Amino acid sequence: MSKFVLPCNSCGSSVVVARTQAGMSIPCDGCGVVLQVPTIRNFGSLKQVEEETPVAATPKSSLWLSLLAAIAFIAGAGSLAYTGSIGWELYALLNQVATAKLDLTKNEEDYVRDVRTASLKATPADTWDYWNEMTEFGLSQASTPEFFRIKRYIEAQRPELLKWGAVSAVCFTVFAAVTLMLRRPKKSSALST
Ligand SMILES: [Zn+2]
């Protein structure tokens, strides 16, 4: 409800009055002199007190929502960073694959068969050297071929990449939704006169 300023001519202070007090006699807060509140017809002569926009106290629920948004954002950023690190690792490996001209579309049986075919073409001298190397350094020196190492690693990491990518997408969606919910303008209740 609108409030009006009723000035006191005795002390210079003023009293705030409402339309419901029209025609009444009220004491001045400053000096106690009885003031005559104008009738409703003359209320227009009084200065209206500017309505302060009521500062809506932040409801508890939005504190929880803000907390949820913060957690979702941090979790989203964390999982996005993890997704990025997996992605970067896979990217580096795929570069290695390209450099080494490895055909990862081949399955492991095909790879073994190709190696066998190639070894059958090796000269007896090559085979002899290889045999000597084996007996000297032991079979443990024969490392897992790049093909197996890379192919298995990529196959193991691909679902991880998708999983953490999805987790970060969900987190950021929650963050966006909660943020929008918090920003939505609330229905103003300060329109009464
Ligand atoms: Zn007064």
Image (tube, rainbow, N blue to C red):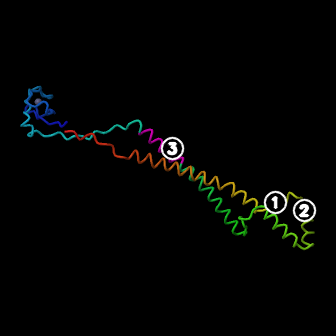
Type of amino acid under label 2: Met
In depth, the one of 36 and 30 nearer the eye is 36
* Quadrant that contains the N terminus: top left
Q: Residues within 10 Å of mark 2 (few under 14, many from 20)?
A: some
Q: Which mark is residue 143?
A: 1
Against 114, residue 188 (above or below) is above
Report helix, strand or loop for mark 3: helix
Q: Which residues are magenta?
A: 62-75
Residue at horizontal 84 percent and vertical 69 percent from the top: 117
**Residue under numbered circle 3:** 71
Residue at horizontal 81 percent and vertical 60 percent from the top: 143
Find out if the beta carbon at label 2 lies less than 8 Å from the nearest ligand 1 atom: no
Type of amino acid under label 3: Ile
Location of residue 92 by image quarter: bottom right
**Residue 176 on the magenta span:** no
Q: Residues within 10 Å of mark 1 (few under 14, many from 20)?
A: few
In depth, the one of 62 and 8 nearer the eye is 62
User: Horizontal and vertical percent for residue 172?
Assistant: 50, 50
